Amino acid sequence: MDPEKKKTILPEPPKSAEPEEPEEGFVPYCGSDEQKAEQKASRKSKIKMWIFVILLILVIAGFILIFIGRRYNLYSETINSLKFDYRTGEADVPDESLTKGSCAKVLRDQIGDKSVSVDAAMYLFDDQTQLSDTVSVYSYVHTKNSNSAVVKTGSLNWFMTKKQSLESPLLFELLFDTVNYDMLKASCYDTYRAEVSGRQYICEVWLICDLTGDEPVYYTVYRYYDEGRLAGVRVLSDQDEMMQVFDIRSYTIK
């Protein structure tokens, strides 16, 4: 045996000409992509949660508005604070000593050419004596040369109100007038005592004809006086079957 050992050199394996392909079904691990996917899913979950919270708040707010609208609105406030409350009608109290039309004439003389400011609430009844679901509150000013009113209207079970300004409404004539003009005629038809909601009034029935339009409009006006002060007015017109009732909260003559 040769003391000098021969070195054996193993041949290198041949290099593949094509790159190795991963086995079928192999998914390489990528930590950053998985983290991004989790963050994206978390953001979607938070967005859904906030949408749910906002919708819940809106629903609760809607219920609160409905609750307030049904109990605390112009309609409820007005109807629950009526001084002249005609919802139960009236009872006639015979009295032969009354002078026809005297209360209205005395009040009209007091006004003369002075200005009048009136705060009144108006509610309606249909021909079946059913109370309407709307009321109006009037702030009315009459002077020698002008008439104007600011009117707020509210509805049953609704909290919002409608506000409008009226120029030259036919209010002074219905509430106070007793004299005849070229375009308006007024005459007292009857006077009697009436009991309304437990209180007694002197009621004067006035017939008023408005000739300012193309055709005459006829009104039957019931004016109720409490110790000489106008407290309430009922108005019936030949143009419709509704009855207007004015609760005269206050008025001042200057």
Image (spheres, rainbow, N blue to C red):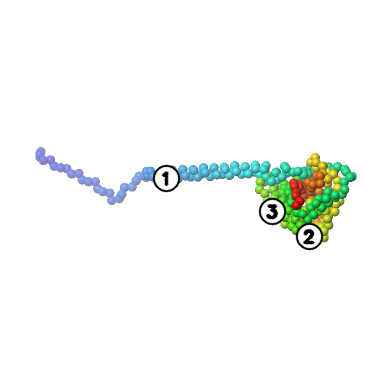
Give whichever of discs 1 and 2 has the lower sequence position: 1
Q: CA distance from mark 2 to mark 3?
A: 22 Å
Mark 2 or mark 3, which is nearer to you?
3
Q: Is residue 40 left or right of residue 165?
A: left
In the foreground, 134 or 116: 116
* Residue at image location 83% in from the left, 45% down from the top: 202
Residue farthest along the right direction in this orientation: 96
**Numbered label attached to residue 164:** 3
Taking depth in this image into account, of 176 and 174 the one nearest to the observer is: 176
Residue 54 is situated, as x and y percent measured from the top left of the image, at 55, 44
Q: Decide: few, some or many residues near mark 3? Use Cα within 10 Å; few <14, some 14-19, many ≥20.
A: few
Residue 142: percent from the left, percent from the top?
A: 75, 54
**Disc 2: CA contacts within 10 A as few (<14), some (14-19) or many (>=20):** few
| Residue situated in front as seen by the camera: 239 or 197 | 197
Label 1, label 2: how far apart the Cα atoms are: 79 Å
Task: Report which residue position mark 2 lands on.
Answer: 213
* Pointer 1 residue: 36
Nearer the observer: mark 3 or 1; the answer is 3
Viewer can see residue 71: yes
